[in-house]
Image: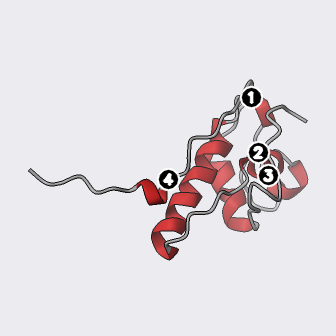
Amino acid sequence: MTPIKDRTSRINKAGDQQFCAASYSTVTAEVLESAHAKSTGKLLNFSSQQIRDCSSDTDQMNSTGAEVNHNCEGGTLFSAFTYATEYYVLLENDYPYKGYGD
């Protein structure tokens, strides 16, 4: 039997979306956090609120060619990851989670 590796140093506690259907932004932030931890050894906490807000901004997303997400009304991982690869994602402390739509 292959032993299970401890990967807790690469995973933050799951974010609470409260009453907002924006799992696309939470998942995107968590994947970025894990990838960053795997490559650097440092676990950061990226802002899912920024990803949600900004991947729902028509002006920012038009330049990427991806569809615009819909804040707390849902969205796609593709658009959230597109935003995250085109723009700098801040840390949660700098752009905290509000848990409601704008």
- Pick whichever of labels 4 and 2 is earlier in the sequence: 4
- The residue under the point 63% across, 55% down is 81
On the image, numbered disc 3 is attached to which residue? 50
Q: Is residue 24 above or below residue 46?
A: above
Nearest the eye: 91 or 88: 91
Type of the residue with mark 4: Ile
Q: Nearer the viewer, mark 4 or mark 2?
A: 4
- Pick whichever of labels 1 and 2 is earlier in the sequence: 1
- Picture coordinates of residue 29 (x, y %)? 63, 52
Q: Which mark is residue 52?
A: 2
Nearest the eye: 100 or 79: 100
Question: Contact, CB < 8 Å: mark 3 with mark 4?
Answer: no
- Element under label 4? loop
Type of the residue with mark 1: Cys
Residue 64 figure quarter? bottom right
Q: Which mark is residue 11?
A: 4
Q: Is residue 37 above or below residue 55?
A: below
Q: CA distance from mark 4 to mark 1?
A: 22 Å
On the image, numbered disc 1 is attached to which residue? 20
Q: CA distance from mark 3 to mark 2?
A: 5 Å
